[in-house]
Image (cartoon, rainbow, N blue to C red):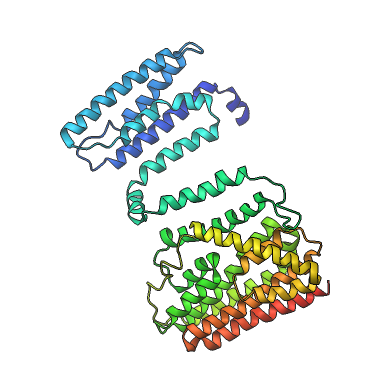
Amino acid sequence: MWLQFLESVPSDFIKFFLVLLFSLLFGLEQQRRHLLAQGGHFGSSRTFALIGILGFVLYVISPKGDYIPFLYGGLVVAAFFLISYWWKIKNTGGYGLSSILVGLITYCITPMVYNLPAWLTLLIVIGVLMVTEIKEKLYSLTAKLHQDEFISLAKFLAISGVILPLLPHEPISQYINISPYKFWLTVVVVSGISYTSYLVKKFIFPSAGPLLTGVLGGLYSSTATTVILARKSKETVSTYQYSAAVIVATAMMYLRILILAFIFNKQIALYLLIPFAICMVAALGFSFFFYRKGKNEKVERNSTLDENSTANPLEFKTAIFFSVLFIAFTLITHYVKMQFGAVGISLMSFIVGLTDIDPFILSIFEGKWEISPAVLAIATLNAIASNNCMKFFYALSLGDKAMKKNLIIGFGVLVVIGLISTAVLSCV
């Protein structure tokens, strides 16, 4: 019954209702925003609703394919806006154009309703409402922006939206079985994860405590985060909270690497899924336990990563350094594989874990090796276990000695789980 009723409703009626609704929403938003203003804004909610209705009438009565009445009506409305703007400048000294621009968009609602998909028209309406309501937040965001923020954004857009699509998909050579496209995609993905973590840390949680610092920093670099948190632990008596932060940073490392595995090599990712899930659950469990135990400890709320630890990961030198490491590890891994086979790669992974493991792991994920995915997954686990040992050494030597017991338990369990997982995969 209701479907038959809706089908009988003329489409022009529905479109008129939408135009009136959207126009009234714009008017209500403008009237609310200027409720305390003494003047200088154009009209009230009724004015915007009538502008929308005027646009609808002139658009509908215009001959098909010839919208001269609608265009002339737009010129008349624009003339009134111009008079209002002149009066505003003369009497208030204000130069804001937002109300006038919203009024012009209101007049254009009808052609949008008639010619654009419903989702796009609704998206435009939502965009107008959101942009006009976040004026103060935009001012606050502007105050936080560093002079190089837009340069950093431009760099990320350039490497992801300009350079990446232009690169060839053919392998570089028979010895480096990686195409320039996949190589640069690696840089884009890693930089994207780091850049997102950087933006969240700086603009959403600028005063994060140790635990949140560990979460966000772990997505960027768990090793760097461990070093910074270990140093900060000497400045307070919050040993349990800093222990929790160090462990949770390593948990985020497992998440980051698992995401990269699913992006570049799903077969290896499936082998790593269960071991990584167990390690993440264990790390998060220890972190939660330490956090609850140290909840009553005194902690400085400004205990966050310093500027160097949250430095923009898209700096040119950083990208070049990562690229060189990636190619170097690809060549070394290829040589070790040719000379010593799978055993050589497994042993090499322990040594690589003492440095930055991301380039090596990504070379494992992206390379086309004549080795089973299980063996490559074992090499990944070995590198991570070795890297966890190195982070434990950093935290123990740089941090408060009171964290020793917590760190031994946390990292010890993670290393044991990694070795057991390696043994299990070796039997597959």
Tell me if residue 298 comes above or below residue 68 in the rendering. below
Tell me if residue 253 comes above or below residue 34 in the rendering. below
**Residue 399, horizontal then vertical, whole percent:** 48, 83
Q: Is residue 314 visible?
A: no
- Based on the displayed image, in which of its 4 quarters is residue 328 positioned? bottom right
Q: In front: 62, or 316?
A: 316
Q: In front: 317, or 119?
A: 317
Residue sitting at x 40%, y 64%: 206
Residue sitting at x 24%, y 25%: 83
Q: Relative to residue 99, is residue 393 drawn left or right?
A: right
Q: In the current view of this chain or complex, which residue is farthest to the top?
A: 63
- Based on the displayed image, in which of its 4 quarters is residue 28 positioned? top left
Can you say which quadrant of the picture contains the N terminus? top right
Q: Relative to residue 418, is residue 96 drawn left or right?
A: left
Q: In the current view of this chain or complex, which residue is farthest to the right?
A: 428
**Residue 202, horizontal then vertical, whole percent:** 42, 61
Q: In front: 222, or 53?
A: 222
